[in-house]
Image: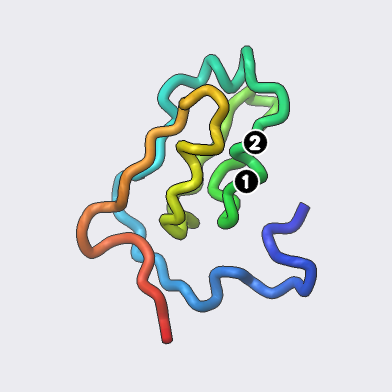
Amino acid sequence: MSAFGKNKENPLRYVKIKVAAESHIKIKDKNPCIDKCENKPCTYYCPARVFSWSGEKQAIKVDYSRCIECGACPWGCPYDNIYWEFPPGGYGVHYEI
């Protein structure tokens, strides 16, 4: 599945993201992802595709540098297993006009 829409346009083309040294998104505990979560909704409800599942390593990968700060991640996890906060001041999304 592509990270782009039907027209293949990059959804992040109007956004610049200044990436902080440390992630503002974390998986609280990897065990619910492996043991309980069947369809891994975090890998498809995030509009920026921050989360991906590595079946061979049995882990959710978090690419926080893609985050557009919509705040959806904690709400979409059925096990309340995602910690999210805004990046520190000066980092994160900067919208271009």
Residue at the farthest bottom position: 97
User: Residue 8 bears which disc, if any?
Assistant: none
**x, y percent for residue 43:** 64, 41
Q: Residue at x 36, y 72 (%)?
A: 94
Q: How is the image coloured?
A: rainbow
Q: Residue at x 59, y 38 (%)?
A: 42
Q: Quadrant of residue 51?
A: top right
Q: Is residue 4 above or below residue 26?
A: below
Q: Are marks 1 and 2 in contact (CB under 8 Å)?
A: yes
- Counting other residues with Cα less than 10 Å from the Cα at mark 2, is it few (<14), some (14-19), or many (20 or more)? some
The Cα–Cα distance between marks 1 and 2, rounded to whole angstroms, is 6 Å
On the rendered image, what quadrant is the C terminus found in? bottom left
Q: Residue at x 57, y 27 (%)?
A: 78
Q: Is residue 80 above or below residue 16?
A: above
Residue position for label 1 = 45
**x, y percent for residue 84:** 37, 40
**SS state under label 2:** loop
Q: Is residue 12 left or right of residue 67?
A: right
Q: Amino acid at mark 1?
A: Tyr
Q: Nearest the camera: 10 or 77?
A: 77
User: Residue 41 bears which disc, if any?
Assistant: 2
Q: Is residue 80 left or right of residue 56?
A: left
Q: Is residue 76 above or below residue 46?
A: above
